[in-house]
Image (cartoon, rainbow, N blue to C red):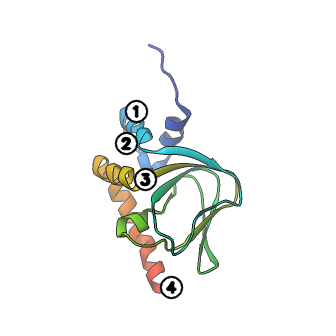
């Protein structure tokens, strides 16, 4: 039997976040998310704006700034924008690409479906979000 590879699914499969998911589950996750590419210097989210999607970095580097100060540089496997969706709050940081990036984009509805359909992944996303909420609240 011949196996066909989908670059989007192969990119998702490399993420630590999805460890333990079957190929079928990876395909389902791929159906929930759109894949986009953006050049260096692209603002993906602005602090204070309403959150309308979550992003997962497949490739590239991204700067995260809060109140005009860089607080982190992140790369592949990082989930961005989930705090605004989980908390139904405004964005707590500005996110800008440092290099060309490849991202998965999940609308609010698809992000909710992901949380429901993939409980282990949802737990990891919630855990990571909780760890990042504390510094954000201390800065407020």
Q: Distance between the residues labelled 1 and 2?
A: 10 Å
Q: Name the residue under label 2.
A: 20
* Image marks 1 and 3: residues in contact by CB distance under 8 Å: no
Q: Residue furthest top?
A: 1
Label 1: which residue?
A: 23
- What residue is drawn where x is 36% and y is 63%? 126
The percent coordinates of residue 82 (x first, y second) are 43, 62
Read off the residue under disc 4.
139
Q: Is 89 displayed left or right of 6 in the figure?
A: left
Q: Residue 99 appears in which quarter of the rendering?
A: bottom right
**Residue sitting nearer the eye, 34 or 22:** 34
Asked where in the image residue 112 lies, by quadrant, the reply is bottom left
Query: Marks 3/4: CA distance?
Result: 28 Å
Label placed on residue 118: none
Question: How many angstroms separate mark 2 from mark 3 (CA)?
Answer: 24 Å
Tell me what residue is drawn at x 42 percent, y 67 percent.
Answer: 83
Where 116 falls versus 97 (above or below)? above
Residue lying at 57% horizontally and 52% vertically, measured from the top left:
76
Q: Do the residues labelled 3 and 4 touch (CB within 8 Å)?
A: no
């Amino acid at each position: 039997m011949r196996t066909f590879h989908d670059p989007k699914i192969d990119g998702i499969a490399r993420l630590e976040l999805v460890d333990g998911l079957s190929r079928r589950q990876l395909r389902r996750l791929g159906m929930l998310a759109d894949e986009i590419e953006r050049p260096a210097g692209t603002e993906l989210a602005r602090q204070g704006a309403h959150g309308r999607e979550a992003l997962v970095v497949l490739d590239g580097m991204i700067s995260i700034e809060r109140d005009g100060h860089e607080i982190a540089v992140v790369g592949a496997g990082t989930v961005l924008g989930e705090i605004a969706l989980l908390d139904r709050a405004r964005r707590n940081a500005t996110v800008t690409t440092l290099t060309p990036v490849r991202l998965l984009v999940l609308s609010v509805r698809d992000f909710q479906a992901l949380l429901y359909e993939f409980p282990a992944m949802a737990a990891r996303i919630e855990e990571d979000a909780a760890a990042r909420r504390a510094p954000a609240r201390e800065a407020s």
